[in-house]
Image (cartoon, rainbow, N blue to C red):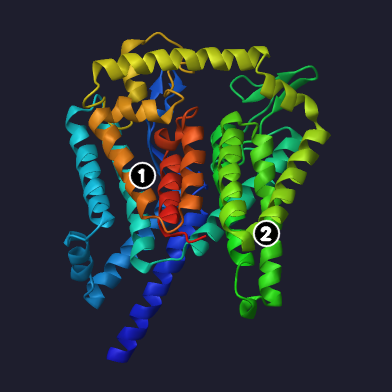
Amino acid sequence: MEKNTFSVIKTAHAFVVSGILAWVGLILWQARIVIDPRYVRGVFWEYGSISLYAHEVVLLIVLAVWLIVLVVSGDLWLVVKKISVSITGVQHFLALAICLLILWLVGGVFWSVDPLVTVSRLVHIVLSALGVGVLVYYKVSWQSVAVMLVAGEVAQGLLAINQTIDQVVIGSTYFGISPQIPWQYGTSVILYDQGRWLRAYGSLPHPNILGGISAIVTLLAVALYCSWCNLPLRVRTMRAQVVRAGMLGALVFIMSALVVSFSRAGWLGAVVGLLWFGVAIVLFKANARGALLRAALIVIMTLGIWVYAQPSPFVVRLSAQAPLEQQSIDERGISFEDSKEIVKSSWLYGTGFGTYTHQLLTQYPERAMHINQPVHNTLLLIASELGAVGFLLVGSVVFLVWRRSKSHMFSTAVIFSMGAMMMFDHWWVSLVVGGSVAMIMLYIVHTIDV
């Protein structure tokens, strides 16, 4: 009986590890059930509605099995004890910073301008944090996590290429994809001399999200390829060579998604991250220079092919002189001014997690919904919703994770890349997918050894 019980527990542990990796791979799957849809003047209010995502259902199943396994095996108390015990060095301060941040987020419910939305956003964040906690508990290798993110992004690349060629996004409830047509109002397009050019969405809500995630996964794929090419001679088998070639193939699709998203923030993040990581490899990792060169050639060739095939949209997007580009810049200017006012009025506590647009709707009830959006700057959004205290706590967690990283070459590249993108986008905090990807990347930053 004991032997059978041990076998069942061992199988359950394997299921949890496989399940949590599946969650990482499905994190970009945006199918969801809208539990409490909210509308403002007949327009769906994304940031005030409450949803449950398909990948969160997968995560809930994994967490339930994990909890049962811990109870049956008697390891639950050991986990609680490990969390509660003070750990020496930087990790002790990291655990303290995380606990204080969680307490601040929970406390924010009491002064939030929309407590229900804050509780909903907290549930999403806690679920993702528990998912990362499972990765930590099982000490899942960064390579395994990276492979799943790369696999998920390859699927986005395939979708993005198809959308670019067909110039239409076909909707799907099961994949969480909204239909997008270039001539339709509200669709993200580039207005150029030949008409309206559709920016690729993948399965994500906006091309900027596709571009941002593609940028960070491009950097991750390059790091993974360099790591695999740096293996000892005894493990450089034919199978390993096929896997490495497969990663270069994956890089074509990931880079394609980045290019055809036409996200300037994503392009900037990729340039910053790849340049920093590339220079660090050249200066300090002589044995990885060949792998870096091969990956760089794939990146440059993919970019060159897309630009050569259709140069006009790239010229317009980079020049920022077209009417739609100028309109976007003007609207961002308005949002920056709005955020400054909100920060001034609630600088210490903030408005409450996830309530930025609620505050805008209160202050400007007659303004168009496409203007009452979160400020396109993640740092200002954090300061607005969490106040100065929350802003410092988030910064402390990121800094302490970076300090404890085994590879400051890669971790610094990731922080700089994400930081550059966060200066021009809000979805890292305002949407569930952004927060989940950010936390998974922090886990990789914490464990990577390239």
| Residue appearing at x 67%, y 45% in the figure | 255
Residue 420 placement (x, y as % from top left): 50, 33
Tag 2, which secondary structure?
helix
Does 204 sit above or below residue 182? below
Q: Which residue is mark 2?
A: 291
Q: Residue furthest top?
A: 366
Judge depth for marks 2 and 1 and give the one in front. Answer: 2
Question: Residue 276 versus residue 210: which sits nearer the camera?
Answer: 276
Residue 348 placement (x, y as % from top left): 21, 25
Q: Residue furthest front?
A: 283
Q: The disc labelled 1 sits on which kind of residue?
A: Val
| Residue appearing at x 32%, y 48% in the figure | 400
| Residue appearing at x 46%, y 65% in the figure | 141
Residue 265 relative to residue 72: left or right: right
Residue 26 relative to residue 361: left or right: right
Does 207 sit above or below residue 320? below
Residue 320 placement (x, y as % from top left): 65, 18
Question: Residue 140 versus residue 268: which sits nearer the camera?
Answer: 268
* Quadrant including the N terminus: bottom left
Q: Which residue is mark 1?
A: 398
